[in-house]
Image (cartoon, helix red, strand yellow):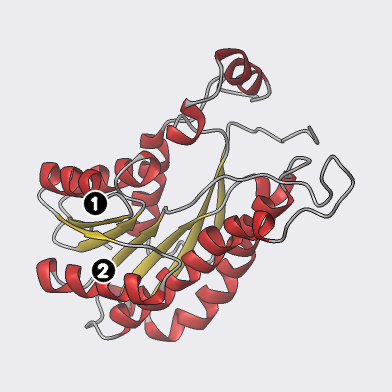
């Protein structure tokens, strides 16, 4: 669809991949709703791009529903929805002392990355289904975020890999389900991106990660993710796709 004149919502839109996507879509002429746990940063980004902001916990149904209602009242329902909210975690099944890892340490990523994404999708799809169709009968597009860890998770990333694997695996299923409503579903699988999630790593660790990337030999930029999300919104024939954005990186076991 043509982005100019459309409304877009971005979860995790106050920083990192989400912020870059919010700014990119706004620059293309969309009115953008920024959903994030950080009220101050969400408001700052929304103010700078002429959009609206809402505090949102994607794992909580009531919080997410209220945030969507707030944005609908402020800027109207979204035809473009990009789910960027997520957390990076890591825990092994068995602790160093030989005991089973507490279950709550293995489910946090699944709650945010998988359940949170599904929560976002159900609300976005319901809003889009009520809109008038555009060209080709399209009513909207949903872009989700997985990770290359969904395919080559490293040791100690089982919970994170499971959370992202669920997002990737469900892409084609949800695309088929929502086809009758004229809603496309695509998914971006980033590699090592230069975002706040990696900013806290020591320089030597960051350099070792860069060394594993095939080409180009660097971390990915949030703007590159945003450009792909924009293309997924614009290209009406792109549907049910999971696209890697990783410089040909294939993660080693450790």
Mark 2–mark 1 contact, CB under 8 Å? no
Q: Residue at x 68, y 52 (%)?
A: 161
The location of residue 85, given as percent across then percent down, is 42, 54
Q: Which mark is residue 222?
A: none
Kindly identify which residue carries mark 1: 39
Using the image as rendered, state which of residue 233 and residue 68 is in the foreground.
Answer: 68
Which of pointers 2 and 1 lies earlier in the amino acid sequence? 1
- Residue 227 lies left or right of residue 105; in this view the side is left
- Residue 61 lies left or right of residue 49; in this view the side is right
Q: Residue at x 36, y 51 (%)?
A: 12
Using the image as rendered, state which of residue 225 and residue 166 is in the foreground.
Answer: 166
- In the rendered image, the vertical position of residue 243 relative to residue 253, given as above or below: below
Inspect this view and state whether residue 239 appears.
no
Q: Residue at x 26, y 48 (%)?
A: 22
Residue 140 lies in what quarter of the image?
Answer: bottom left
Looking at the rendered image, the disc whose residue lies closer to the viewer, 2 or 1, is 1
Quarter of the rendering occupied by the C terminus? top right
- In the rendered image, the vertical position of residue 44 relative to residue 69, given as above or below: above
Quarter of the rendering occupied by the N terminus? bottom left
Label 1 crowd (10 A; few <14 / some 14-19 / many >=20): some
Inspect this view and state whether residue 95 appears.
yes
The location of residue 181, given as percent across then percent down, is 38, 84
Residue 138 lies in what quarter of the image?
Answer: bottom left
- In the rendered image, the vertical position of residue 173 relative to residue 186, given as above or below: below
Q: Which mark is residue 67?
A: 2
Q: Label 2 vs label 1: CA separation?
A: 11 Å
Q: Dot 1 lies on which element?
A: helix
Residue 152 lies in what quarter of the image?
Answer: top right
Residue that lies at the very extreme toward the right in this rendered image: 98
The location of residue 66, given as percent across then percent down, is 26, 74
Q: Residue at x 51, y 57 (%)?
A: 187
Q: Dot 2 lies on which element?
A: helix
């Amino acid at each position: 669809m043509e982005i100019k004149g459309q409304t877009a919502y971005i979860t995790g839109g106050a920083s990192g991949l989400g912020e870059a996507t919010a700014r990119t879509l706004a620059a293309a002429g969309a009115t953008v709703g920024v959903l994030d746990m950080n009220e101050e940063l969400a408001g700052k980004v929304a103010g700078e791009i002429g959009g609206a902001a809402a505090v949102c916990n994607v794992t909580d149904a009531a919080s997410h529903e209220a945030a969507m209602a707030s944005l609908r009242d402020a800027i109207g329902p979204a035809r473009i929805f990009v789910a960027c909210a997520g957390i990076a975690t890591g825990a092994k099944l068995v602790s160093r002392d030989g005991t089973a890892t507490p279950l709550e340490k293995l489910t946090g990523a699944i709650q945010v990355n998988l359940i949170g994404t599904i929560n976002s999708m159900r609300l976005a799809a319901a809003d889009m289904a009520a809109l008038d169709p555009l060209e080709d009968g399209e009513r909207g597009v949903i872009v989700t975020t997985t990770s290359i860890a969904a395919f080559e998770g490293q040791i100690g990333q089982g919970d994170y890999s499971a959370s992202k694997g669920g997002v990737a695996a469900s892409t084609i299923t949800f695309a088929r389900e929502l086809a009758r409503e004229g809603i496309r579903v695509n998914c971006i699988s980033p590699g090592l991106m230069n975002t706040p999630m990696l900013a806290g790593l020591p320089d030597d660790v960051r350099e070792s990660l860069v060394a594993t990337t095939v080409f180009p030999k660097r971390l990915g930029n949030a703007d590159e993710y945003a450009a792909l999300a924009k293309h997924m919104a614009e290209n009406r024939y792109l549907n049910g796709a999971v696209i890697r954005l990783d410089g040909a990186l294939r993660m080693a076991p450790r």
